[in-house]
Amino acid sequence: MKSRIWNSLIYATVLTFCLALVLTPLALAFSPQNPDLVDVGITIKVNQKGFSDTRGKLFDQKNTLKIPKGQVVRITFVFDESMTSLAYGDTHQVAITGNEGWTKEAEKIWMLSRQSSITFQAGNVGETYRAYCIIDCIGMEHLNNLIIQVV
Ligand SMILES: [Cu+2]
C-alpha cells in the first residue's frame, strides 16, 4: 500500500517536471521580450562625441547604420563616456523615431546603468529611422541624428 502511494507521488513529480520542461520554453518563446525573437542585435556606443559602432567609428550623414528589411532589430545603446571626461557624470536617453511616425524610448543610461535597448521591426528598403538623445547633455549636438537605413 505504502509503495503505491510512493509510486503515485513519484509519478506526479515526474509529470510535473516533464510539463515544466515542455511549458517553460513555450512560455519563453511567446513572451514579447524574448531575445530569440530578435533577428539582429546591434550595439551602439553613446558618448559626447556622438553615436559609434563597437569599434568606436562614429556614425554620420555618410556612415549610416544599416539594417536588413523586415527583420526584428534590437539596438542596444551603451553608455560610453570616458572616466576622465566631465561627461562621465552625464545621463543619456535615446529615442528612435520611424518614418511611419512612431517613437520608442530606451531607458536612461548613465555610469551605474550602462545600457538599454529598443526593439522594432525594420520596414521596407529605403525606409529610414532616426535615433537621438532626448536629455540635455554634453555633446547633445552630436547625439541628435543617428540615421538608420533599411537596406
Ligand atoms: Cu545625451
Image (tube, rainbow, N blue to C red):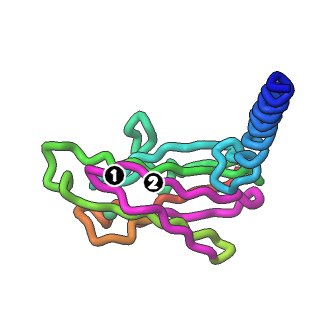
The amino acid pointed to by label 1 is Ser
Which residue is identified by label 1?
113
Would you say residue 49 sits in the magenta stretch?
A: no
Q: What kind of element bears circle 1?
A: loop
Q: Horizontal and vertical percent for residue 63?
A: 50, 48
Task: Give the residue at the far bottom of this rendering.
Answer: 101
Whether the residues at callouts 1 and 2 have beta carbons within 8 Å, the answer is yes
Q: Position of residue 44 (x, y in %)?
A: 46, 47
Magenta stretch in the rendered image: 102-131
**Residue drawn at (68%, 46%) of the image:** 38
Residue 107 % position (x, y): 43, 62
Please indicate whether residue 124 sits to the left or right of residue 92 in the image.
right
Q: Quadrant of residue 2?
A: top right
Mark 1: C-beta under 8 Å from nearest atom of ligand 1? no
What secondary structure do most residues of the magenta stretch adopt? Answer: strand
Query: The N terminus is located in which quarter?
Result: top right
